[in-house]
Image: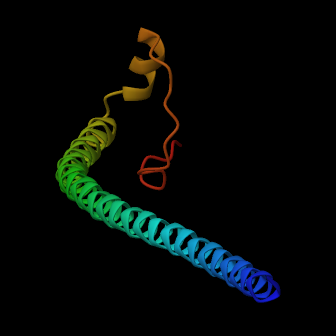
Amino acid sequence: MGDLEQENKVLKFQIEQQKKTIDAQNETIDKLKVYATKKKVDMAIQTIEQKISSTSVDIITDRKADLLVEIESLKRRLSKMEKRIHYHKNKENKFLFFLFTLQNKGIPVNELYEKEGIKDIATSRFADIMAED
């Protein structure tokens, strides 16, 4: 019986070794599954980030195009306003020159303003020419 007991011990030892090997292999398989799952998740995240980035670029490009259109519109409006300002400055200069001419012809322009209650508007235009005596 001694040989059977010895053989039994050897077989039990081999079984224990096989169990440890199987456990180690199962642990390795679990680690590989976790690694594979993590890799899939990382790839999914990367794909999502690329889609978001692509969408963001599209949104930014659309927004940039809208802003460029708005800038052009504002430039046109600014140009029109500058033309109007220039036009009205010319009209103002003509009107002031007309008043200056009337005053030089002897019409009391300043007195009419004061008499009618129109407030004097401070201006430096024609100051040298319109200097009162």
The picture places residue 50, in percent across and down from the top left corner, at 33, 67
Name the residue nearer the viewer: 14 or 123: 14
Name the residue nearer the viewer: 98 or 92: 92
Residue at horizontal 41%, vertical 51%?
A: 126
Q: Quadrant of residue 22?
A: bottom right
Vertical relation: 48 (above or below) 105: below
Q: How is the image coloured?
A: rainbow
Which residue extends farthest top? Answer: 116
Which residue extends farthest right? Answer: 2
The picture places residue 111, in percent across and down from the top left corner, at 44, 21
Please state if 3 lies on the left or on the right of 90 as rendered: right
Vertical relation: 51 (above or below) 66: below
Q: Quadrant of residue 59?
A: bottom left
Name the residue nearer the viewer: 86 or 23: 23
Figure quadrant of the N terminus = bottom right
Name the residue nearer the viewer: 13 or 62: 13
Vertical relation: 74 (above or below) 111: below
Count how many numbered circles sit on residues in the image: 0
Please state if 80 lies on the left or on the right of 115 as rendered: left
Residue at horizontal 46%, vertical 65%?
A: 37
Which residue extends farthest front? Answer: 1
The picture places residue 79, in percent across and down from the top left corner, at 20, 54
Please state if 8 lies on the left or on the right of 120 as rendered: right
Please state if 115 lies on the left or on the right of 9 as rendered: left
Residue at horizontal 68%, vertical 82%?
A: 11
Q: Quadrant of residue 43?
A: bottom left
